[in-house]
Amino acid sequence: MKPYISALRVRFLNGLQYRAAALGGLTTQFFWGAMAIFLYQAFYQSGSQPQAFKYSELVTYIWLQQAFLALIMLYDWDYELFDMITSGNISYELCRPCHIYGLWYTKLLSKRLASATLRFSPIVIIALLLPTPYRLSLPHSIMSFLLFIITMILGLLLLVAISMLIYISVFKTMSPVGSMAFIGITGEFFSGMTIPIPLMPQWLQRVCYIMPFRWTADLPLRIYSGNIRVEQGLVSIGVQLLWILILVSVGSIMMKRITKRVVVQGG
């Protein structure tokens, strides 16, 4: 366990050094958040306001989405890991006295945590100070806030488990482009990042509920705003844990099998 904790700490501290990139990301995320809110405001004012998702809940959903983007977006790739696989430097990783799946999982986790640490607080503070129609609302209740934190953490663990499958696939394809495009676009849509799930048709919502992506972003954000009741949130924690267990187990088995047959060029 000690090597994984050390890797998490070192990678986290390294990620905190990229303050200029974080500043650029803050500006972009605030701009896109405001643009999305204005766009949906026009939709709601046209008389098409959905009963299942109030405008205040939607505004809160969007601001939280932007504030914690590093924890819920699937397309935050670590190109250093891709380069290790395609260049043959994976041989150095295989020599380390720890399981490569756990080591890479830890690296991806720390990268996202460092990025979120630098970005989330300024967006939350500014969004809380905006005028009423565009303001980030406070949590629906104390219990909703606690469940939001728990489901956000579990959603992050699930998201990293999903992204690990992409890195494992590169051992076979030797190119991350296809896996990144397919899983990235699919995951972004079915997690509610493109269109909030309550605004989708009922049949499409049912598809989202049976896939793992929705439990990484849509669930914690809607729990915070009160769109999902506390009782439903407690049940959803069990679903998240089940998906984490399944995907981590599958990924770990795949990594063990595929690294047994790795051929490094020139070795």
Image (cartoon, rainbow, N blue to C red):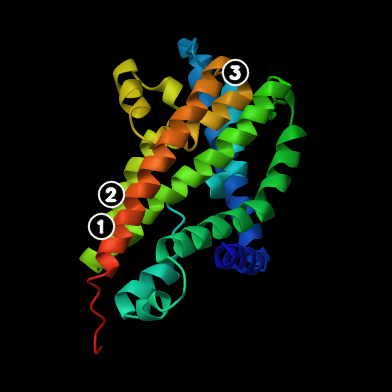
Which residue matches tag 2? 182
Which residue matches tag 3? 230
Mark 1 residue type: Gly
Q: CA distance from mark 3 to mark 2?
A: 33 Å
Q: CA distance from mark 1 to mark 3?
A: 39 Å
Horizontal arrangement in the rendering, residue 55 relative to residue 239 (left or right): right
Give the number of the disc on residue 264. none
Which residue matches tag 1? 178
Q: Badge 3: few (under 14), some or many (20 or more) residues near its Cα, within 10 Å?
A: some
Horizontal arrangement in the rendering, residue 144 relative to residue 192 (left or right): right
Residue 155: image x %, image y %? 51, 39
Q: Quick check: 105 above or below 186?
A: below
User: Could you tell me which quadrant the C terminus lies in?
Assistant: bottom left
Mark 3 residue type: Val
Mark 2 residue type: Phe
Q: Is residue 15 visible?
A: yes
